[in-house]
């Protein structure tokens, strides 16, 4: 499927609220319900829509603390990297993990109830992967949070933002 303005409009509605009824999505993008439904099905089939998820309230669920953990690899061998990937896959507190360019090799975002829980995760990381360096940074305040992607880039625009202009 080729993305066009209408497909992006559908994606914008759905990424803001995946529970939006098809009839409401169709109305917002000026399409018939059946045509909109077919497009949504095709967007799913083509992988543009990966999943529908519920974004839960971390405070109500007892994990209000966010810690960003920076890791310098002890070794860059494939075995170490696989051990690291396998380990973080088993730690539910790890919400995201990314390989970096720069002075650290990896960054992880953890959702935790308190500092004791972070200490437990920290000890497990250090014991299992033996990093060269590990640094935890507690988020004091969340200034922006969201899962919506900037869709303007899909059509070659700047996503509605200037690039230094």
Image: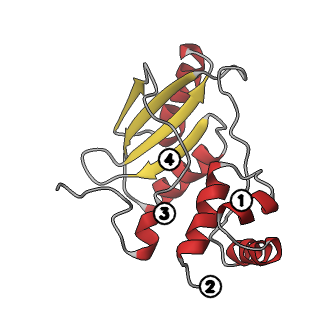
Query: How far across and how far down the image is residue 152, in percent?
Result: 43, 65
Pick whichever, 150 or 33, lies toward us: 33
Q: What is the spatial separation of the Cα atoms under label 1 and label 3, in whole angstroms?
A: 17 Å
Q: Quadrant of the N terminus?
A: bottom right
Q: What is the spatial separation of the Cα atoms under label 2 and label 1, in whole angstroms?
A: 18 Å
Pick whichever, 16 or 120, lies toward us: 16
Query: How far across and how far down the image is residue 157, in percent?
Result: 36, 70
Q: What is the spatial separation of the Cα atoms under label 3 and label 2, in whole angstroms?
A: 16 Å
Dot 2, crowdedness within 10 Å: few (<14), some or many (≥20)? few
Tell me whether the residue at label 2 lies in contact with that at label 1, contact meaning CB atoms closer than 8 angstroms. Answer: no
Q: Which residue is mark 2?
A: 1
Q: Give the residue at x 53% y 20%.
A: 119
Q: Which residue is mark 4?
A: 97
**Residue at the left extreme, as displayed:** 165
Q: Which residue is mark 1?
A: 51
Dot 3, crowdedness within 10 Å: few (<14), some or many (≥20)? some
Q: Give the residue at x 53% y 57%.
A: 82
Q: What is the spatial separation of the Cα atoms under label 4 and label 2, in whole angstroms?
A: 30 Å
Q: Which residue is mark 3?
A: 151
Does residue 154 appear left or right of residue 20 in this picture?
Answer: left
Q: Earlier in the sequence, mark 1 or mark 4?
A: 1
Q: Earlier in the sequence, mark 3 or mark 2?
A: 2
- Indicate which label's residue lies in the foreground, 1 or 4: 1
Secondary-structure class at tag 1: loop
Dot 1, crowdedness within 10 Å: few (<14), some or many (≥20)? few
Q: Earlier in the sequence, mark 2 or mark 1?
A: 2
């Amino acid at each position: 499927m080729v993305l066009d303005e209408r497909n992006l409009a559908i994606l914008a509605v759905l990424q803001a609220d995946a529970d939006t009824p098809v009839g409401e999505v169709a109305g917002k993008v000026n399409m018939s319900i059946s045509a909109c439904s077919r497009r949504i099905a095709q967007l799913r089939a083509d992988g543009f829509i990966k999943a529908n998820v519920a974004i839960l309230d971390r405070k109500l669920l007892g994990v209000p603390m966010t810690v960003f953990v920076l890791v310098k690899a002890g070794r860059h061998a494939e075995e170490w990297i696989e051990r690291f990937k396998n380990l973080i896959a088993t730690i539910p507190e790890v919400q995201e993990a990314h390989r970096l360019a720069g002075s650290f090799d990896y960054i992880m975002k953890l959702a935790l109830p308190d500092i004791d829980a972070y200490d437990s995760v920290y000890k497990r990381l250090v014991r299992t992967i033996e990093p060269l360096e590990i640094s935890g940074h507690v988020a004091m305040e969340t200034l922006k949070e969201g899962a919506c992607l900037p869709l303007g880039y899909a059509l070659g625009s700047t996503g509605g933002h200037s690039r230094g202009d």
